Image (cartoon, rainbow, N blue to C red):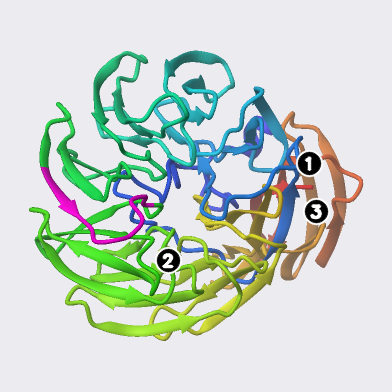
Amino acid sequence: MFRNLISTSALFLVVYTAYGSAWPQYMHDAQNTGKTDICIQEDLSLSWTYSPPQSAPGWQWNQPSLDDDGNIYYGAGYYFLSVNPEGLLRWSVHTEYAFIGPSAVNNGFVYFPCSEGSLYAYTQDGDFSWSYPMVQPVNCGTTVGPDGTIYIGDTTNLTVTDAYLYAVNPDGSEKWTLSFAGADGFYTTPSLDPDGTKLYAAPGNFNLYALNAVTGVELWSYEYNSIFNLVYSSPAVAEISGSKYILFGDLGNMGGGHWRILDENGSERWTTSVPNSIQQSAAIDPDGYFYLASNGSVLKKIDTSGTQLWSRTFSQGYLSNPVIEGSGRVLIGTESGYLHILDQNTGSTLESFYLGPNVGSPIVGSNGEVYVLYGNNILACLEGDLSVNNEDPSSGEPFLQISRTGPTFKISIGDNSGECFIYNTSGRVVFSETIERDLYWSTADYPAGIYFVRVETNVNGEVIEGNAKLIVVR
């Protein structure tokens, strides 16, 4: 029966389609653009939260990553965690040192740094694969290139005064290492040129470098004028209308920081100043727009000529990195506890959600759900009301409609009547009832997991089936 239930037919509809690599690394991609083609679901609300084993201070610019199956990965204190799409812990790694930097997922493996001095590689199922020795990575994230090479920077400690940048092969062997004498270390995630040949990195010595991604040879460097040598704003790069743009922000001088936009040769195209320092990464819309945040709660939209299109002040403390969803709307978190969704044309707020202090940089899942860290590294999932349609071929009107309010699903078949069956993943019927127009199924007494709905009715002498897949979360 279960095999027949999930077989493909014209009336079969899967709600929450198969997961893809929606957000495999920091700021979505190796260019750190923060832009996804996936549109967020409408009418979002808090679906579930996951609290890590250790209460650890959140880092506002941290982001989870997702694998091909929609599993979530992130560090929280002395734990690195994998959480499934229903908000349940899959596996964890525990050490006596903190996991802080963003992870990256590629080809069945997840890569993440630990401050004790290692880059770890685990399978997506939680099996240890290898570790690569480092000094003391803090905040720096992993970038994975198109050939599987992992790039990561390293900070300094009391005994080591040089910063390092590593290129590591997928098997954990060293591809190349580059040292920067006297630098204070990497607190950013490197980025790759769209063609994968150039790597951009800021080692904390007043310079941004462009390097040959294959050999590590320096191509050019750009010196920024700031009283602080460190950079917390990871470089982002994009090609727009045939021209390259490299963006990063500095901590600035006493009067504030600067966003710096360079061309592919390291020449300054233009700069824009903000009244406070910059620790955020830019988000880049390939239509030719940049979203630039700063610690003064200011978010700006700038075009490729440097013209400011709008500026928005939140008056809510620090801001997270902005990200851009498929229809162009901008998502951003605030220190005071809000996740905002903004209109891309005006910067006005379309929706706001209060979660708790220190809302981090959100990510978008393959089905338009939104994940974000807040507070002491609590992971939150926001989803919209579930809404599906199967069309009645005899009338062209919707046949099966499903919506959700909290733990209760409403199953509707218009003016029709019939039989409704709900199965679990083993094929066992867990609920069955005659349906007259509508019925309500409360999941309060059912475990979290995937369920299948099948509705059968007779319309004008023709047997009609409607099928849907539901996800029950806690």
Q: Height in image: 35 above or below 287?
A: above
Magenta stretch in the rendered image: 220-231
Rendered view: 312 above or below 422:
below
Front label number (1 vs 2): 2
Of the pair 57 and 44, the residue shown nearer to us: 57
Quadrant that contains the N terminus: top right
What residue is drawn where x is 26% and y is 28%? 179
Q: CA distance from mark 1 to mark 2?
A: 44 Å
**Labels 3, 2: front one:** 2
Label 1 residue SS: loop
Q: Residues within 10 Å of mark 3 (few under 14, many from 20)?
A: some
**Nearer to me, 206 or 219:** 206
Say which residue appears at 50% left-offset and 82% top-offset.
313
For residue 98: magenta?
no
What kind of residue is marked 3? Glu
Alpha carbons under labels 3 and 2: distance apart: 62 Å
Residue 126: image x %, image y %? 59, 21
Amino acid of disc 1: Ala
Say what secondary structure mark 3 lies in: strand
Number of other residues with Cα within 10 Å of mark 1, as a class: few under 14, some 14 to 19, many 20 or more: some
Q: Nearer the viewer, mark 1 or mark 3?
A: 1
Task: First in sequence, mark 1 or 3: give its number.
Answer: 3
Mark closer to the chain start, 3 or 2: 2
Where in the figure is residue 388, as x and y percent of width and height? 61, 62
Residue assigned mark 2:
277
Check if residue 221 falls in the magenta segment.
yes
- Residue wearing tag 3: 419
Q: Is residue 189 above or below residue 309?
A: above
Residue 370: mark in rendering: none
Where 191 falls versus 356 (above or below)? above
The quadrant where residue 446 appears: top right
Q: Identify the residue position indicated by label 1 in the image.
A: 448
